[in-house]
């Protein structure tokens, strides 16, 4: 047995993780209607005072193209905590997307 001591789980610079779900019920499926909403939850860790901007875009993986008008941008400005959470809500006309796989791309 080796004693590794105490490890600090501090944020070194920048980490980002995301999860996209149906905004209505939190599952991975949306109704193919005119006002479908996809919620993208962004979990981040960074040094306080380090602002960053995230651009999100919806991509129709089945048709291999961006979904027109789907781009969203948010700016995160943490003040005290190194880690936090932000959300992007995409409203999309999904009436022609039945059976398609939609992916959310983020760029920070």
Image (cartoon, helix red, strand yellow):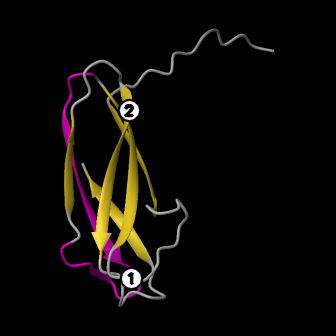
Can you tell which quarter of the image residue 75 is in?
A: top left
Judged by depth in the image, the label closer to the viewer, 2 or 1, is: 1
108 horizontally vs 24: left or right: left
| Residue density around tag 2, few if under 14, some if 14–19, many if 20 or more, within 10 Å | some
Looking at the image, residue 22 sits to the left or right of residue 14; the answer is right
The label number, if any, that marks residue 70 in the structure image: none
Q: Which residue appears at 45% of the width and 79% of the height?
A: 101
The residue beneath circle 2 is 84
Quadrant placement of the N terminus: top right
**Identity of the residue drawn at 26% across and 78% down:** 67
Say which of 38 and 55 sits in front: 38
**Is 75 one of the magenta-colored residues?**
no
Using the rendered view, name the quadrant where residue 10 is placed: top left
61 in the magenta segment: yes
Residue 14: horizontal and vertical position, in percent?
33, 34
Q: Is residue 1 above or below residue 53?
A: above
Above or below: residue 99 compared with residue 102 = below
Residue 39 image point, x, y percent? 39, 58
**Percent from the top left, x then y, of residue 7?**
57, 15
Q: Which residue is mark 1?
A: 33
Q: Position of residue 71 (x, y in %)?
A: 20, 65
Stretch in magenta = 48-69
Along the viewing direction, whichever of 5 and 36 lies nearer the viewer:
36
Q: Is residue 5 above or below residue 98?
A: above
């Amino acid at each position: 047995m080796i004693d590794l001591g105490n490890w600090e789980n501090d944020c070194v610079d920048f980490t980002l993780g995301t999860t996209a779900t149906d905004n209505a019920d939190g599952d991975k499926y949306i109704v193919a209607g005119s006002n479908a909403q996809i919620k993208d939850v962004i979990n981040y860790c960074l040094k306080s005072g380090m602002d960053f901007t995230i651009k999100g875009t919806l991509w129709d993986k089945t048709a291999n193209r961006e979904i027109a008008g789907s781009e969203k941008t948010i700016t995160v400005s943490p003040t005290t905590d190194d880690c936090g959470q932000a959300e992007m809500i995409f409203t999309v006309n999904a009436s022609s997307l039945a059976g398609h796989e939609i992916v959310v791309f983020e760029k920070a």
